[in-house]
Image (cartoon, rainbow, N blue to C red):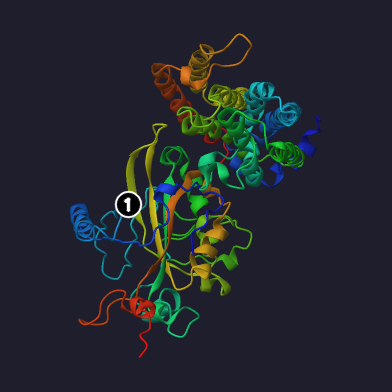
């Protein structure tokens, strides 16, 4: 996977970027973290693909209890790399669209993917009639793997991904609207946060060089969010359902999440990417 | 024709479609509310309110002599309506907005116009966290002046022929996709009449506000539907979620004091009396 710096520059399309765009950070400094991020995304997608296979096998076998148990831990790999996955909007719609994206609701023909299966598993409590949806999800995830493998990661999308993940949390996780049937929102919440933290960690040396105080503030807010999430971890490594999250904790999460969203939105600027 | 959701839409059944679109416009919200209540009170057996969306247009400073008027700003903070066709130009309005007699529309529709309404939620918190340069390149206009990229005034017309690779105005910039300004896309021009709306707070604590987009055209397919189809997948979608609206028909206006709104339609649907 490791390539020579020049080959990476070509792969990443950085040679075509004017050098003035990197006033603050030399392009070579970003090549390493971006290629490391591609490795991370590839690994997460491998996990997503194998977990999706196991999950959909359970669905197709009619094993409701196993399918319900595997739903959230499978999705989490998608949530952690969502900004990259969303670059393919057709697949994002077929894998991860929510019921409110469809005027006809659960009956909409193009309502497919995780949340449609979630509806049957947790609301109707059945695996009946899910065969085609399970196969479709598997196929879409494999398609996503192939497409990401051939993707040149745009630096601004990678760095901007940290903020995009926090926007996901602020818009859909705080309200508990993401997994409205299974109430497993905290898995997705943690997935988004971990995915954002990963990006920050990869660019840590460059960020610290620009603004050490900023880095410390970001770390503090990540720690606060993680500490609150940890209160709801279960013994098997999973999470309590979102309805168990106390109102005071929901509110306590809003501040650090919004502050992270604000701060991480400046990351591109700090690293000289526009 | 019933509005069908576009890929980025998340239409809420509670604020979509309907048999009749009624628009009240005045200088104060109260006037509109009282007019609506009068209608409701007087037509209890005929009308049921399906949904309602209030909107406003921020007041503009009077235009300076010799300087073209500026468009109002939407809640993304950008001037909206800059490239709108001139509604005082009858020839342009006849070709873009009004259904023409002798077209393939029914005779009663002549001099009416198709109305597309869209309630487009703006993710303003996320937008406000987006760097200015990125906002401008997503829309293709300068935020302060409303001028196209590289321009000085809102009324300037971008020359995309000189920018085929999108170095100045990105190829997927909102204004470039919406109106590519080629001879072929002149057929897709629409007359926009948008309003800003602000409704309260969403479940996630984010502000529920955006654009009550309304546009008029003689042909919905050639107009709004083609324009919106070109916009599908645009980078701006990250900050927008259309949640409601519908397609309606604006009846021809009255021609004199013996005329009334809807006369041509009612005449056309009247059962023919046989002698």
Where is residue A187 shown, x and y percent of the image? 58, 22
**Count of labels in the image:** 1
Asked whether residue B145 appears in the rendered view, the answer is no
Query: In this view, which residue lies farthest toward the bottom?
Result: B275
Q: Nearer the viewer, residue A141 or B246?
A: B246
Asked if residue B50 lies left or right of residue B134, the reply is left
Q: Chain of mark 1?
A: B
- As helix, strand or loop, the secondary structure at mark 1 comes to loop
Residue A210 position in % (x across, y down):
54, 26
Question: Which residue is drawn at the image coordinates 49% and 57% (left, top)?
Answer: B149
In the displayed structure, B66 sits above or below A131; it is below
Q: Residues within 10 Å of mark 1 (few under 14, many from 20)?
A: few
Q: Is residue B131 left or right of residue B23?
A: right
Percent x, y of residue A255: 41, 23
The answer to which image quadrant residue A139 occupies is top right
Residue position marked by numbered label 1 in the rendering: B52
Q: Residue at x 42, y 46 (%)?
A: B121
Whole-percent x and y of residue A46? 75, 29
Q: Quadrant of the C terminus of chain B?
A: bottom left
Residue depicted at 54% across the width and 29% down the height? A181
Q: Can residue B63 be seen from the camera position used here?
A: yes
């Amino acid at each position: 996977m490791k390539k020579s710096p020049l080959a990476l520059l070509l792969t990443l399309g950085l040679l075509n970027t004017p050098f003035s765009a990197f006033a603050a950070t030399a392009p070579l400094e970003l090549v390493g973290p971006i290629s490391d991020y591609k490795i991370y995304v590839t690994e997460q997608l491998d996990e997503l693909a194998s977990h999706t296979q196991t999950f959909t096998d359970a669905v197709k076998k009619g094993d409701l209890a196993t399918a319900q148990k595997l739903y959230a831990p499978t999705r989490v790999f998608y949530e952690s790399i969502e900004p990259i996955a969303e670059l393919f909007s057709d697949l994002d719609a077929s894998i991860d669209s929510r019921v409110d994206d469809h005027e006809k609701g659960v009956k909409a023909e193009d309502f497919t993917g995780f949340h449609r299966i979630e509806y049957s598993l947790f609301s109707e409590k059945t695996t009946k009639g899910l065969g085609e949806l399970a196969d479709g999800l598997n196929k879409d995830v494999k398609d996503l793997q192939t497409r990401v493998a051939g993707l040149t990661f745009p630096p601004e999308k990678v760095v901007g991904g940290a903020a995009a993940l926090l926007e996901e949390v602020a818009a859909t996780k705080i309200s508990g609207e993401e997994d409205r049937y299974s109430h497993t929102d905290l898995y997705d919440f943690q997935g988004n946060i971990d995915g954002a933290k990963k990006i920050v960690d990869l660019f840590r040396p460059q960020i610290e060089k620009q603004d050490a105080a900023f880095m410390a503030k970001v770390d503090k807010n990540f720690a606060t969010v993680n500490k609150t999430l940890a209160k709801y971890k279960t013994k098997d490594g999973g999470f309590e359902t979102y309805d168990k999250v106390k109102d005071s904790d929901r509110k306590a999460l809003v501040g650090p999440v919004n502050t992270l969203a604000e701060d991480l939105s400046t990351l591109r600027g700090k690293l000289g990417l526009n | 024709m019933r509005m069908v959701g576009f890929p980025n839409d998340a239409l809420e059944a509670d604020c979509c479609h309907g048999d009749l679109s009624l628009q009240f416009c005045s200088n104060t919200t109260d006037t509109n509310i009282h007019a609506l209540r009068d209608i409701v009170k007087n037509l209890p057996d005929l009308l049921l309110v399906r949904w309602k969306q209030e909107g406003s247009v921020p007041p503009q400073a009077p235009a300076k002599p010799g300087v073209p008027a500026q468009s109002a700003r939407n809640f993304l903070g950008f001037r909206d309506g800059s490239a709108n066709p001139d509604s005082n130009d009858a020839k342009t309005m006849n070709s873009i907005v009004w259904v023409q007699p002798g077209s393939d529309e029914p005779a009663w529709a002549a001099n009416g116009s198709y109305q597309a309404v869209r309630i487009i939620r703006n993710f303003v918190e996320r937008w406000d966290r987006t760097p200015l340069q990125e906002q401008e390149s997503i829309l293709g206009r300068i935020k302060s002046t409303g001028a196209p990229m590289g321009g000085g005034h809102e009324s300037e017309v971008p020359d995309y022929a000189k920018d085929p690779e999108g170095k100045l105005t990105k190829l997927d910039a909102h204004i470039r996709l919406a109106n590519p300004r080629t001879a072929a896309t002149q057929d897709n021009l629409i007359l926009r009449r948008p309003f800003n709306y602000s409704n309260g707070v969403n479940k996630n604590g984010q502000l529920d506000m955006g654009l009550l987009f309304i546009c008029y055209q003689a042909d919905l397919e050639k107009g709004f539907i083609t324009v919106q189809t070109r916009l599908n997948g645009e980078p701006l979608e990250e900050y927008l979620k259309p949640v409601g609206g519908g397609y309606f028909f604006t009846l021809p206006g009255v021609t004199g004091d013996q005329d009334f709104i809807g006369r041509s339609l009612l005449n056309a649907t009247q059962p023919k009396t046989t002698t």
